[in-house]
Amino acid sequence: MALRIRTTKFRHVYGAQCRREQTFENVRITRNTHDSNFCSVNPRFLAIVTESSGGGAFAVLDVNRPGRVDINCPRVCGHAGAILDVKWNPFNDCVVASASDDASVKIWTIPETGLVGTLTDWSADLHGHSRRVSYLEWHPTAANVLMSVGFDYKVMVWNAEQAEPITSLACHNDTVFSISWGRDGALISTTCKDKKIRVLDPRSAQVAMVSFCFSEP
């Protein structure tokens, strides 16, 4: 019997390391130990949470202008606590949201040409969590709809344009580790420290399904 080798177009694909002039250098990335990427990118800008004192801050860099970043480069500042997550609006490359230790979510509008100075004026200030806000996710199909989750165990859905809450889901009894919209934005999935994966319906503010429960080893 002849040996048949399964063909794959990925078998001999290799990555190439970027040249130094294609990378960003000298970025003072935050030392916060929160479990987050601390960065977000879109076709125009790269947002990176940076080390700062007296509140949280993040840098906004032009993706088409790599190189050594000035230590005093313009930043987005306005939170009273450390920034734990940043996410670009998928419907507007100049709008970015930030979540913070100060229990607030802020929406920022970046100038078309990028930052030329420190930005301290936010477009919207969202208050509804009683403890620090850990993660953000924009709705994949509806513009200006943002989801946040905090250490108060609440999942909130916001109208970012009107700076108003759409719904609040208080169905968790422990720390939420991750959140995600469904592909069409109809449902939300979460993972929690209580070892359960939940599927939530934001329209009814109810748990649609507890899909899996991990057992102790």
Image (cartoon, rainbow, N blue to C red):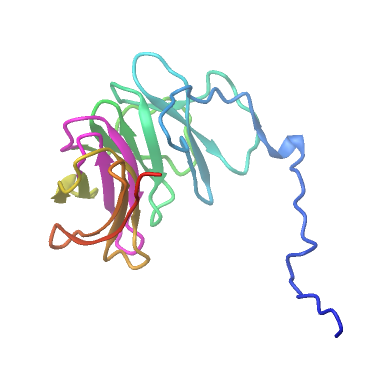
Q: Is residue 113 found inside the magenta-colored segment of the image?
A: no
Give coordinates of residue 48: x percent, y percent.
49, 33
In the picture, measured across the screen, residue 23 lies left or right of residue 52, that is right
Between 104 and 120, which is closer to the camera in this rendering?
A: 104
Between 170 and 147, which is closer to the camera in this rendering?
A: 170
In the picture, measured across the screen, residue 116 lies left or right of residue 197, that is right
Residue appearing at x 18%, y 36% in the figure: 129
Spot the residue most to the bottom. 1
Q: Quadrant of residue 22?
A: top right
Residue appearing at x 44%, y 29% in the figure: 58
Give coordinates of residue 90: x percent, y percent.
41, 55
- Could you tell me which quadrant the N terminus lies in? bottom right
Residue appearing at x 41%, y 44% in the figure: 217
In the picture, measured across the screen, residue 193 lies left or right of residue 113, that is left
Q: Is residue 114 above or below residue 43?
A: above
Give coordinates of residue 97: x percent, y percent.
34, 41
The residues colored magenta run 127-154
Q: Is residue 104 above or below residue 190?
A: above
